[in-house]
Amino acid sequence: MPMAAYRYKAINARGEMLEGQMEAANEREVALRLQEQGNMPVEATLASESGGGSLKSLLRRKPFSGQQLVQFTQQLATLLSSGQPLDRALSILIDVPEDEKNKYILLDIRDAVRGGAALSAALERQHGTFSRLYVNMVRAGEVGGSLQDTLQRLAEYLERSQTLRGRVVNAMIYPIILLLVVGCALLFLMGYVVPQFAQMYESLDVTLPWFTRIVLAIGNFVKNWWFALIAVPAVSLLWFERKRHDAAFRIWLDAWLLDKRIIGPLIAKLETSRLARTLGTLLKNGVPLLAALGIARNVLGNRILAGDVETATEDVKNGRGLSVSLSKGKRFPRLALQMIQVGEESGALDSMLLKTADTMEQETSLAMDRALAALVPVITLLLASLVGVVIIAVLVPLYDLTSAIG
């Protein structure tokens, strides 16, 4: 079998993140070799693919993504709770998904389980379809002998994550649609309607106010260079899509966003909610705190906050409390840190982390509602003012000319 170079990330017994490269036949072999060395695999990708990324890969839908994964996890937990053997439960679920790729994946998982493999190992061989968080939680459930309970908690975790992500997306849909619709209307007004008036005033040879001349000049520019106005944003998006995979640029962008007055606290609460729910769910399934921190920091999208978690992991390893360690970066919400401290002092860190996640989600939802309530009128007023200025600038000379003739 041909060998390929794979880059990997793994967590050792001390909770340290290991990164390296090895020759292997596939991702499964990389994971097995890391486990034999006493490490917990987190990620394994082809060296030729690492650091890359394109718009095509962003738009391509992965198998068992989003709600599909939630439904699969819930259904499997329900079947196991009703007393069905694992291979029988997987056989039942093979006919549920309509997507052929999903059916093939379930068939491969079922066959691997029937061949004596653990469910976590069968999931791990699916070339990244199931995240390391998912696989490691299933493995913890298998070791603890409570796979169905673990799957139920995992389904709840995934559903809450989907709900939170959906709130963020839904909050942005209306402002984006508003900007696109009014922007297109303004582009049509400036590129087609205004030049018509420019030709008319030129034929009449009248003296125009300065603001009318400016608007007419912009209209002629839009008419002659409309393709550039479309191409420049498109090229900028493509450039940003490529640039965001650059580590230095991503760190700068994440730091810049965290420093913004409105969006910074919102990002911090979103990421704190994600971190707390991941940690709480992992701890409830028996994953040690250091290993849980190593997994959870890979769930965070903001590299600065992920770096703070990595630093906190080192402090926890040296005997410091989690809340004190996370507070050193002064980026996580104070309320969340206080709740985590209470959980540490009461010996119920896992439960308090989940409550912290609930609290941060509620505050995030409230903050987004307030921001949206203020953003939509501001956008509407701004765009309406631009349209109004254009109309006034074009019609005022016509009104003056009509009054003079009358």
Image (cartoon, rainbow, N blue to C red):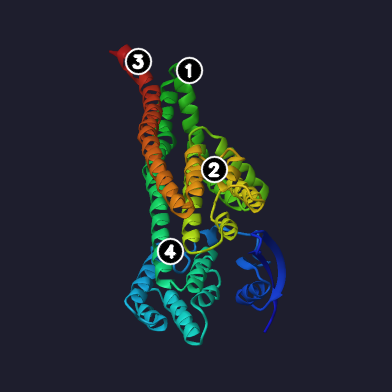
Label 3 belongs to which residue? 400
Residue 188: image location, x then y, percent:
40, 38
Amino acid under disc 3: Asp
Q: Earlier in the sequence, mark 3 or mark 4?
A: 4
Disc 3 vs disc 2: which is toward the camera?
Answer: 2
Amino acid under disc 1: Trp
Q: In the picture shown, does residue 156 fall above or below 359?
A: below
Q: Secondary structure at mark 1?
A: helix
Cα distance between the residues tagged 3 and 2: 35 Å
Task: Give the farthest residue toward the left.
Answer: 406
Name the image quarter holding residue 8: bottom right
Q: Earlier in the sequence, mark 1 or mark 3?
A: 1
Cα distance between the residues tagged 2 and 4: 48 Å
* Residue 210 badge: 1
Residue at coordinates 39% horizontally, 70% vertically from top-left?
Answer: 72
Cα distance between the residues tagged 3 and 4: 71 Å
* Residue 354 badge: none
Cα distance between the residues tagged 1 and 3: 14 Å
Q: Residues within 10 Å of mark 3 (few under 14, many from 20)?
A: few
The reply to whether the C-beta atoms of the residues labelled 1 and 3 are less than 8 Å apart is no
Q: Residues within 10 Å of mark 4 (few under 14, many from 20)?
A: many
Q: Nearer the viewer, residue 357 or 21?
A: 357
Label 2 belongs to which residue? 228
Q: Residues within 10 Å of mark 2 (few under 14, many from 20)?
A: few
Figure quadrant of the C terminus: top left
Q: Earlier in the sequence, mark 3 or mark 2?
A: 2
